[in-house]
């Protein structure tokens, strides 16, 4: 799962992921299982609206590491090829 994040084009964070979703350029979204559900609620609704698959198995630390950043990440959106 996380190897997919490391090897594909992606955006990290709520605002960037929401923008990419509205533009229709997202194929899959990863939410951190330990992120605040209230923070993710609007983005999760946007994913449902656009029919985008969501995975919630990794922690913020794991997502941050997979994205190659020094801090945790609550959301990573994989971009379409």
Image: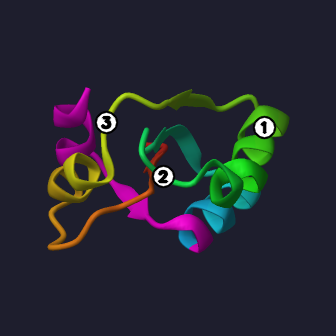
According to the image, label 3 marks what residue? 58
> Which residue is more in the foreground, 11 or 59?
59
Q: Residue at x 28, y 64 (%)?
A: 72
Helix, strand or loop under label 2: loop
- Judge whether residue 24 can be spotted in this image: no
Residue reaching furthest to the right: 49
Left or right, 49 with reference to 60: right
According to the image, label 1 marks what residue? 50
Helix, strand or loop under label 1: helix
Give the label, 3 or 1, closer to the camera.
3
**Residues at marks 3 and 2, CA–CA distance in whole angstroms:** 10 Å
State the image coordinates of residue 51 (x, y, percent, origin top left): 74, 28
Which portion, as a residue range, is magenta? 1-15
Q: Is residue 61 above or below residue 11?
A: above
Count of marks overlaid on the render = 3
| Quarter containing the C terminus | top left
Q: Residue at x 15, y 56 (%)?
A: 65
Q: Residue at x 55, y 70 (%)?
A: 16
Pointer 3: residues within 10 angstroms few (<14), some, or many (20+)? some
**Residues at marks 3 and 1, CA–CA distance in whole angstroms:** 22 Å
């Amino acid at each position: 799962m996380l190897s997919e994040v490391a090897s594909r084009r992606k955006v990290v964070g709520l605002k960037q992921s929401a923008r990419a979703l509205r533009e229709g350029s997202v194929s899959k979204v990863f939410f951190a299982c330990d992120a605040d559900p209230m923070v993710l609620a609007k983005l999760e609704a946007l994913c449902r609206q656009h029919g985008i698959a969501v995975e919630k198995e990794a922690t913020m630390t794991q997502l941050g590491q997979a994205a190659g950043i020094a801090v945790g990440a609550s959301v990573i959106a994989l971009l379409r090829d």
